[in-house]
Image: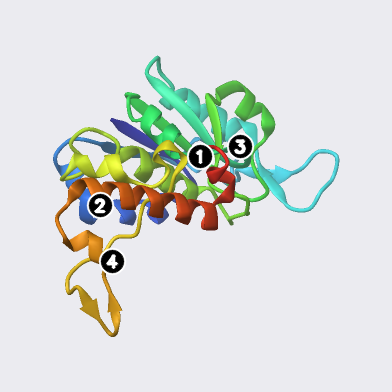
Amino acid sequence: MKFSFVTLFPSLIEGYFSDSILSRAIENNKISLDFYNPRDYTDNKHNKVDAQMVGGGAGMIMTPQPLYDTLNKVRSDDTHIIFLTPVGKKFTQNDAKRLASKKHIVLVSGRYEGIDERVIEEFGDELFSIGDYILTGGELASMVVCDSISRNIDGVLGNSDSLDIESYENNILEAPSFSKPLSYQNRDVISEYSKGNHSKISQLKLKLSEAKTKYFRPDLQSKI
């Protein structure tokens, strides 16, 4: 899987992939990254990529020309271009699993007050938001989406079975997890967990998952 990041600040993203699981995924050729900076494609003599909004409004937005030229450079028959924007569909685990089968994903990070809508209309295959809040730029959101998709690519995680018991599978949160010691500072592991009856443990974990979902995410609980 190839990921291309379109961003004014590549250095904000590069460091995230220099350690841990995703670094090994790059070393093992499970994923690859490249970067496109719209400033490298602007025809403005001062390297500007932003302008005031037509019709008024506070702040600046990213102008069409640099992004058009950037995305025309990266777009091909295999690319799936995603814009990270607060007005997009909320990104979910199901989206991450679905997109893990793509060959080449392009993640476009906005800055300032956003991106000229004509760019999105021309190039956007999907628009995603990672939550109901506003960031200073789309780079964090791009990294979140890339991370979530990557870990669903075959061979990226050391133990692919861990994908089967995660939160949001079947609209339910993951059950509480514990490690040894069985007792720590007057708090004990649920006794049934340590008795070895896997059928009872599975039933208990399902009940705990349902209770946790009902408490923390009633919006998901209504879909069970």
Which residue type carries mark 4? Ile
Mark nearest the camera among 3 and 1 is 1
Query: Above or below — where is 32 with respect to 211?
Result: above
Q: Position of residue 40 (x, y in %)?
A: 47, 40
Which residue type carries mark 1? Phe
Secondary element under disc 1, as helix, strand or loop, is: loop
Q: Position of residue 103 (x, y in %)?
A: 32, 24
Query: Above or below — where is 78 with respect to 204?
Result: above
Mark 2 and mark 4 lie on one chain; the one further toward the N terminus is 4
**Residue 190: which disc?**
4
* Residue in view at x 53 percent, y 28 percent: 126
| Distance of label 3 from label 1 (alpha carbons) | 8 Å
Which residue type carries mark 3? Gly
Mark nearest the camera among 1 and 2 is 2
* Residue in view at x 20 percent, y 40 percent: 161
Mark nearest the camera among 2 and 3 is 2
| Distance of label 1 from label 4 (alpha carbons) | 33 Å
**Residue 201: which disc?**
2
Secondary element under disc 3, as helix, strand or loop, is: strand
| Distance of label 4 from label 3 (alpha carbons) | 41 Å
Which residue type carries mark 2? Ile
Residue at the spot of label 1: 91
- Residue 26 visible in rendering: no
- Residue 138 visible in rendering: yes
**Residue 155, located in which quarter of the rendered image?**
top left
Q: Is residue 173 left or right of residue 114?
A: left
Mark 1 and mark 4 lie on one chain; the one further toward the N terminus is 1
Secondary element under disc 2, as helix, strand or loop, is: helix
Task: Name the foreground residue: 96 vs 51.
Answer: 96
Residue at the spot of label 3: 88
